[in-house]
Amino acid sequence: MVECNPFQIRQFEADRAYYNQLDIENFSLMLKDPTFCYKFYWLEAIVMLIDENVEQTSFDAVINEMIANAWYTVLEYHIHLSGMRLGRIDDSLEKAVLLLSQLSQLPSNASKEEIRNAIKTHDEALKKFKEQLTKMVPYRALAGFFKTHGKEVNWNSTTSIIKLMDEVNESNLLPYIFDSGSSLSKKIFFSPIWIRFIQENSVSILGWIQYEKSKWLQTNNPEVPSIVNKLTPLNEKARKLDKVRTLWNHILKSRPILDIYSHQEIQLNNYDMDHFVPWSFVMNDELWNLTPMDPSLNSSKNNRLPKWEFFKDFAQNQFILYQTIHEESAAWNLFEKCFRDNLHSIWAGQELFRPGNSKEDFMNILSKNMQPLYDSARRQGYEVWGY
């Protein structure tokens, strides 16, 4: 027997004023007062499924989508979805992502299809964390609609919540309702009129969710820079290294520069620009964090921190750059071309690259500003590369 979506028994007008039947104000409260990150990922998953013309689904399918959406943020950028509680991860969604990564050995840039397939393979192992995600967020996301109805909610009774949900839905149309199934098998039915609204406004709604999510993640990861850029996979086109490379090419033509790890001389036409503190943490291409590096070693280092002991050699290369730009007008002209994309830090412009620094002054300024960044990345969970 085919199960019928209960919303299909109600017909709504499809004219331009259809949204007058929707409680947009309470929809805007669906992300209010989170305790964990779950509301953001729950609503985001629902909007994405609706955008794919899904009319009914299950808790299990929505939570699978939540895991896939959180994957890159957790694994590539080492973001804690609900912060750390006394050094411990309490967030079930983050725990599910970490466990799936361990079991599947998928890379941090795995595709959504690969992640979904891995979830199917390891579903039993993930069940504990997935069931924890069903307990409150699907219901509490509707709290604004319930409050408007003027009745107290017994959050400890799923049966009472579903009964209240059905009552509210009769007079104040909800975006979704549930059946009486249990745990992950519980079905979710989306209202056709809400489907229309969400599909017509999905870009704006997802943008709002991303904004609220980024505020939440930044609050819970206060040491991490540029959270807003860490919600989606890396866009390689965002990298701005051309001007920096041109400057280093000029320096390499006139003096030897040693790889800070191997101490071998860098070859002019065979080097990579390496971020001492990984790009995925700093999310910028600041000149003071870059040095030429042997390509094979750069591939090995990947998204990890070098041991801090290498900082001295890194700072030595940076000082050579500093000397060159202040001694040669051609180098200074190339340095000026880096201003737009590679020199935004106030301390670097006002202190590090100002004329007149001794080598000791220069290295102290660089160390004073880079070590806190390095230490923050380590606390966030970035591995140290064992060259």
Image (cartoon, rainbow, N blue to C red):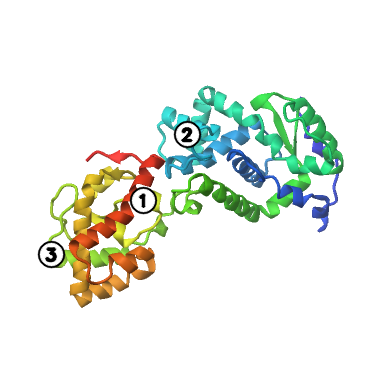
Ranked by sequence position, the earlier of labels 2 and 3 is 2
Q: From the top left corner, tell me how far across and down residue 60 is, in percent.
A: 62, 30
Which amino acid, by three-letter code, is at mark 1? Leu
Please report the residue visible at 62 percent of the width from the left and 36 percent of the height from the top: 62
Along the viewing direction, whichever of 225 and 241 lies nearer the viewer: 225
Q: Amino acid at mark 3?
A: Arg
Q: Is residue 84 left or right of residue 149?
A: left
The residue tagged 1 is 373
Observer-side mark, 2 or 1, equals 2
Three-letter amino acid code at the position of disc 2: Leu
Residue carrying label 3 = 255
Q: Is residue 10 above or below residue 255?
A: above
Any part of residue 234 in sight: yes
Q: Position of residue 275 (x, y in %)?
A: 31, 53
Q: Secondary structure at mark 2?
A: loop
Nearer to me, 293 or 211: 211
Which type of secondary structure does the marked residue at label 1 adopt? Answer: helix
**Residue named by callout 2:** 86
Between the residue at mark 2 and the residue at mark 3, the CA separation in whole angstroms equals 50 Å
Rendered view: 325 above or below 5 = below
Under tag 3, what secondary structure? Answer: loop
Circle 2 or circle 3, nearest the eye:
2
Disc 1 + disc 3, Cβ < 8 Å: no
For mark 3, does the 10 Å Cα neighbourhood hold few (<14), some (14 to 19), or many (20 or more) residues?
few
Of labels 1 and 3, the one closer to you: 1
Give residue 104's mark. none
